[in-house]
Image: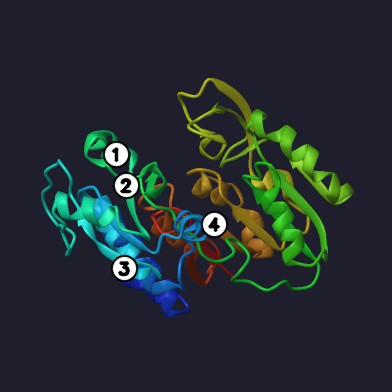
Amino acid sequence: MSTFDYPCLRSLLVDEESRVCFDARKAFAEVPSLALFYKIIRRSCGKYRFRDLEGFLCDKGVSSWIGWGSGDTALYHELVLTDSKYDYLGTCIGSSSTSGDRPTCILEVSKALDLAKSPGCGVLVNEEAFERDKKLLSVVPAEKLLIVKDHLVGRCGWQYFDYFQPDGTEYFVDAGCLDGGTSAAFASWCKGNYGHIYAFEPNPLSTEAYRKGMSVFGERATLYEYALLDRIGFTSFDAIGRSKWDARVDELGSTIVPCSTLDAVLGGRPVTYVKLDIEGCELRALIGGRGLLAEKRPRLAVSVYHEAEDLFAAMNLLRDMAAYSFAIRHYHSDAIETVLYAF
């Protein structure tokens, strides 16, 4: 890890929830453990909504769960199930061996399989563990198996819009606008009291979807097909990635897109609120908006989870650049979707 004055940065946070988020991100930067991150971050907000679990309760009457698997994911699932409104019956390691920390309640395979056959009981397993132990799990009715890709996903809050309150006529920068969902959420947040939406999206696979959706904004929205960086010109871009949410500036990307800066595009225009979620380029975009931030001091919602040190680097930069104060909120049960609010 780089050397930051962590106590000084932490002292700039305005509430205890922010300090919990700070501590969780620092722990994850030092040891990228999903279980450790969740153990800390769950203290910062209300209950997470685990849609997959809720679906099983509604559709199949499952109210008790066995975790199946090993390692850090098993520890994470134990914490999630223990926190939920369901009965946690324990974790079965299955046919694998594991080292390091273990769940506190380990079930023998025979015991776990017997329990799994009982009414109202389900088995939570990720794809890797399921493929490894498919023969063992074949005795569990398919409708009682919840198979997740990597780990269970839970969400909370209203990302980007549950910290600040609207303040007069808003002028919004939606950097990383994808299909326009965040722009629509912004319009709802400020109840339509906005002057303009400046939307940035360089991915040619997403801009058409935004154009179709932005008709509801009329002339009060403009789409800029630029990557927001700290320079003007062109950059390599990975337009496909693992999904549309992962498309990003990448020196090995096969697509060439134009890039610009906040200062160059929006200098002299009113800006009250800036949201940056641009897959690891947030710091470069802030540097490219140095003049705008210093002059207009818009409120900021900056995604700070794409790289391990993004949070600390962004706080350090903004403190020196425009003497901002800070809050942090986290919207996901794992280590993505942390937002730094600056004001």
Do labels 1 and 4 touch, CB within 8 Å? no
Q: In this view, does 164 lie above or below 55?
A: below
- Distance (Cα) linking label 4 and label 2: 33 Å
- In the displayed structure image, the side of residue 13 where residue 27 appears, left or right: left
- Disc 4 to disc 2: CB gap under 8 Å: no
- Mark 3 belongs to which amino acid? Thr
Residue 220: horizontal and vertical position, in percent?
85, 51
Q: How far apart are marks 2 and 1 (CA)?
A: 6 Å
Q: Earlier in the sequence, mark 4 or mark 2?
A: 2
Amino acid found under the numbered disc labelled 2: Val
Q: Residue tagged by mark 1? A: 130
Q: Name the residue beneath numbered marker 3.
A: 82
Give the vertical position of 35 relative to 225 (above or below): below
Quick check: marks 2 and 3 in contact, CB under 8 Å? no
- Indicate the amino acid at tag 1: Phe
Tag 4 residue: 302
Residue at x 48% of width, y 67% of height? 328
Within 10 Å of the Cα at label 4, are there few (<14), some (14-19), or many (20+) other Cα atoms?
Answer: many
Secondary structure category for the residue under label 2 = strand
On the image, numbered disc 2 is attached to which residue? 125
Sequence-earlier tag: 2 or 1: 2
Please say if the residues under marks 2 and 1 sit with CB atoms less than 8 Å apart.
Answer: yes
Q: What element carries label 4?
A: strand
Label 2 and label 3: CA atoms lie apart by 16 Å
